[in-house]
């Protein structure tokens, strides 16, 4: 009888299977970890708002309809100008999933200047409760069908717990620009 000699090591396939299993487990753990990064969140919100405002401006030109955006202390919504019976025009909230504010998990402060003057922002529910025929709700910034964006504006998105902030504003060379503050 031959004496078989068994080695006490692992085969290459066994090592590769173990490494693959470890890699899959590490990948699953990394996906589950939600690393909070307020600087990235503020920047992403500002860039998203900039892009949505550009989309609303383009949509106003292509559909020959007036659009607008109204800001609140922690959100915003888009509006469109509707012509009703007897030619009466009113601003209506736009129910479009593409043009919608996506809230962050963290608190975010929004400040708005219109034509260089800061404005006091109210919650949407408070504003809607105070709407009358004489004082209808109107957007802060309008995207006109001729491509204009009026009036000049500056919107600052800031983290209330730090000095991290980005602004979206009317530009000189580009209609809307986004930049970091500080």
Image (spheres, grey):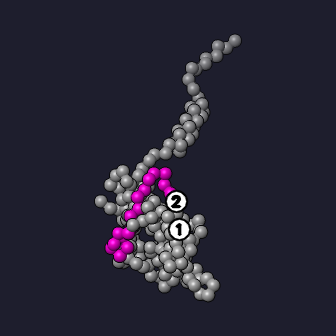
Q: Closer to the camera, 47 or 158?
A: 158
- Residue at the limit of the structure toward the top, as seen here: 1
Question: For this view, does 97 lie left or right of residue 75?
Answer: right
Q: Mark 1 = which residue?
A: 128
Q: Is residue 52 visible?
A: no
Relative image position of residue 156 (x, y in whole percent)? 38, 64
* Magenta region, residue range: 103-119
Give how far apart the Cα atoms at labels 1 and 2 are: 20 Å
The percent position of residue 10, horizontal first and vertical second, equals 57, 26
**Which residue is most to the bottom?**
86
Residue under label 2: 102
Give the vertical position of 2 relative to 72 (above or below).
Answer: above
Upstream in the sequence, badge 1 or badge 2?
Answer: 2
Whether residues under marks 1 and 2 lie with C-beta atoms below 8 angstroms apart, the answer is no
Residue placed most toward the observer, 166 or 72: 72
Quadrant in which the C terminus appears: bottom left
Magenta segment: does it hold 113? yes
Q: Where, by quadrant of the figure, is residue 42 drawn?
A: bottom left
């Amino acid at each position: 009888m031959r004496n078989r000699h068994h080695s006490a090591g692992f085969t290459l396939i066994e090592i590769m299977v173990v490494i693959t299993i470890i890699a899959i487990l590490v990948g699953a753990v990394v996906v589950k970890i939600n690393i909070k990064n307020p600087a990235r969140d503020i920047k992403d919100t500002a860039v998203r708002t900039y892009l949505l405002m550009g989309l609303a401006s383009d949509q106003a030109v292509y559909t020959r309809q007036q659009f607008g955006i109204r800001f609140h202390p922690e959100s915003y919504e888009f509006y469109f100008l509707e012509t009703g019976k007897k030619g009466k025009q009113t601003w209506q909230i736009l129910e479009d999933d593409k043009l919608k504010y996506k809230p962050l998990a963290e608190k975010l402060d929004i400040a708005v200047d219109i034509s260089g003057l800061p404005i006091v922002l109210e919650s949407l529910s408070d504003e809607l409760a105070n709407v009358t025929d004489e004082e209808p709700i109107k957007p802060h910034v309008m995207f006109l069908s001729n491509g204009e964006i009026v009036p000049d504006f500056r919107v600052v998105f800031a983290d209330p717990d730090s000095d991290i902030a980005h602004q979206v504003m009317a530009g000189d060379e580009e209609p809307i620009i986004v930049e970091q503050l500080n």
